[in-house]
Amino acid sequence: TGLSFLHRYDYQNNLKKAVVELESAVKISPAFTDGKIQLANAYLKLAKYDDFSLNFDFAEKLIEQLLHDHPEDSNVLLLKASTLKLKSRFDESLLIYQNILSRKPQLSSGWLGIAEVYEAQGNHKLAESSYLQAINLHESWFHLNVLATFYYRTSQLEKAEHIFQRLIDLTPNNAMVLQTLGAIQFSRSDSNSALQTFKQAAISEPSALNYSNIATVLFYQKKFELAVYYYELAISLNSKHIILWANLADSYRWSEQHKNASAAYSKALELVEE
């Protein structure tokens, strides 16, 4: 159960559940090495999103214990390399990844880890080739998402859009992927595609963010009354967001609803003062 939570495409929403299940497994069977490895991995993933110090400390202690008992285990060494990477000790992390891959060149997780180190060092060419090698060895939603976000972070938007489209084919209702794809399309001045993508995200997850994204594109297209409609929907879900009120006010003003514009600007100012 812990592994299923850890490796779902929406794993970020299930990391705490994964930790609970894996902790239970290790408690029941203290000699369960693979369970400890996956638990350490879950701690490291959770540290990126919730209470870094606490979860990273749990991970480090468990990894040191694993290293003591299994100093040559590639999966344990991968975890050690990850902790060094997170501490920005990139040269030490790189040496471990290179050592692992010299012995196990078919290990996709090794290529993924070394790609992240290369990216952190600013070597985008080696990072890209390593991400691609990981995908060649094991094509999965997770690996494709890592490559897509790498392209997005490094402003390789055409490549990013292509990979995100593949992710949508695999998980058509993933709101986070749809949000990012829409942002890429919008930044490439393809507002019509962005609008459809953001609408798809809102169907999947009717949130203030998704409605606001739709409204932003409509405002850009000078469809101000429609922008008003979607900003109002966004505010109905998050009435304390200053930027939403300011954007709604702009949309009212451009659609010549001056009284509403004045009231919305006043509300934005009230929130600033709060």
Image (spheres, rainbow, N blue to C red):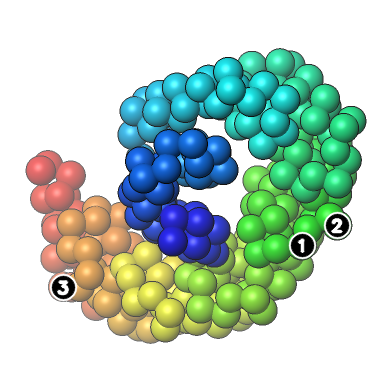
Residue at disc 2, secondary structure:
helix
Query: Given contact means CB atoms under 8 Å apart, are the residues at marks 1 and 2 in contact?
Result: yes
Q: Disc number at residue 259?
A: 3
Residue named by callout 2: 136
Residue 167 placement (x, y as % from top left): 66, 70
Which of the two marks, 1 or 3, is nearer to us in this view? Answer: 1
Above or below residue 132? Residue 174 is below
Residue 117 placement (x, y as % from top left): 71, 30
Residue at disc 1, secondary structure:
loop
Above or below residue 227? Residue 53 is above
Mark 2 closeness class: few <14, some 14–19, many ≥20 residues within 10 Å: few
Q: Is residue 89 visible?
A: yes
Residue 147 placement (x, y as % from top left): 72, 53
Kind of residue at badge 1: Glu
Kind of residue at badge 3: Lys
**Residue 223 falls in image quadrant:** bottom left
Q: Which residue appears at 64% of the width and 16% of the height?
A: 89
